[in-house]
Amino acid sequence: MRNVTVDNITDVFEGYFSPETDPRTKEVLVSMVRHLHAFAREVNLTHDEWNKGLSILKQTGDITDDERNEFVLMSDVLGLSSLVDMMHSSNEATSSSVLGPFHVSNPPPLAMGGDMRKDFDDQVLLVEGQVTGTDGKVIAHAELDIWQTAPNGLYSSQDEDQDIHSFHGLLKTDAEGRFAFTTVRPVEYTVPTDGPVGELLNAAGRHPWRPSHLHYIIKADGYRSLVTEVFPSDDKYLDQDTVFGVRDDLVMEYTEHAADTFPAEGFELSGKVSEPYLKVKFDLILAKTD
Ligand code: BEZ
Ligand code: FE
């Protein structure tokens, strides 16, 4: 096309594809560009604004390295990560939620009833639950990869004073699909704001906080892996998670109990809890693989 106009440029773009292009690639690219063009027309995008957008993309690339992916964080705060997650999760299974950048590979084994607090002396949180399929069948020997912030609000990879495996653990459910361990209550924290995502949040007048949560990846043979989180019902950021990760079925009540009600056996801390402790029950439902 030698006479490209505001009105025909979107169709011209589509017309430039080769007939051999993979159909799905073409569908995704054409739709993305149709929306990009429509957006530019809708807001009457100026050169300054277009340059600003390109500069944000450049900064996002510049700050990204093997340990930090600002593109993922950008997708998280724009709600795209959560939207894609929700579009592909099963309605009958536990909701999925964002993975985030702080998962570490090869987490250390966490025994049933084990304690993740290690050197951190904070109020004990007993976490327990059962993993079942959408048909109600219990899932024995499911693998739970669990991680969270330390009481100082930092993940191990953000904190030189913590071992990389601090507050990370890999636990297997028992024959009845049950799991139990102790930890501390995770705390709310901010996503990193020293890059372009921080600039974007600022420009939008948005805060960078996430409600406190425990992360889980659950894997079991024959079932779809689930990446999710559990949030306490009294967290003040539940209704304004900056990465849009909260779903109704992931919000659980943390209840406080007298020290003498702590289980006398079955936990690493049995016989060692002398202060009131917290408890949360989080049952997980997995969908079968297709
Ligand atoms: C997290 O929960 O660890 C997280 C998720 C998205 C962005 C930043 C952190
Ligand atoms: Fe997190």
Image: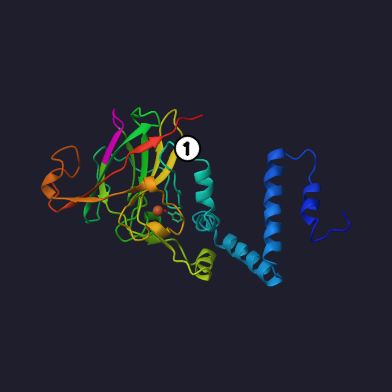
Query: Residue drawn at (31%, 31%), measured in percent from left and top?
Result: 177
Quadrant location of residue 54? bottom right
Residue named by callout 1? 90
Instruction: For ligand 1, tell me if the residue under mark 1 lies within 8 Å.
Output: no
Tell me where residue 55 appears, x and y as whole percent. Answer: 63, 67
| Depth check, front residue: 190 or 155 | 190
Q: Is residue 207 above or below residue 138?
A: below
Query: Residue drawn at (42%, 60%), measured in percent from left and top?
Result: 240
Tell me where residue 174 appears, x and y as whole percent. Answer: 29, 31
Q: How is the image coloured?
A: rainbow
Q: At numbered mark 1, what does the secondary structure look like: helix, strand or loop?
A: loop
Q: Is residue 228 above or below residue 243?
A: above
Q: Is residue 227 left or right of residue 60?
A: left
Residue at the far bottom in the pictured view: 48
Badge 1: residue crowd in 10 Å (few <14, some 14–19, many ≥20): some
Badge 1 amino acid: Ser
Q: Is residue 116 left or right of residue 24?
A: left
Residue at the far left in the pictured view: 260
Asked if residue 288 shows in the view, the reply is yes
Tell me where residue 251 appears, x and y as whole percent. Answer: 35, 49
- Magenta span: 174-180
Q: Is residue 290 above or below residue 41?
A: above
Residue at the far right in the pictured view: 2
Query: Residue drawn at (15%, 44%), measured in percent from left and top?
Result: 262
Q: Is residue 237 left or right of residue 273?
A: right
| Depth check, front residue: 289 or 195 | 289
Magenta region includes residue 21: no
Tell me where residue 246 appears, x and y as whole percent. Answer: 41, 51
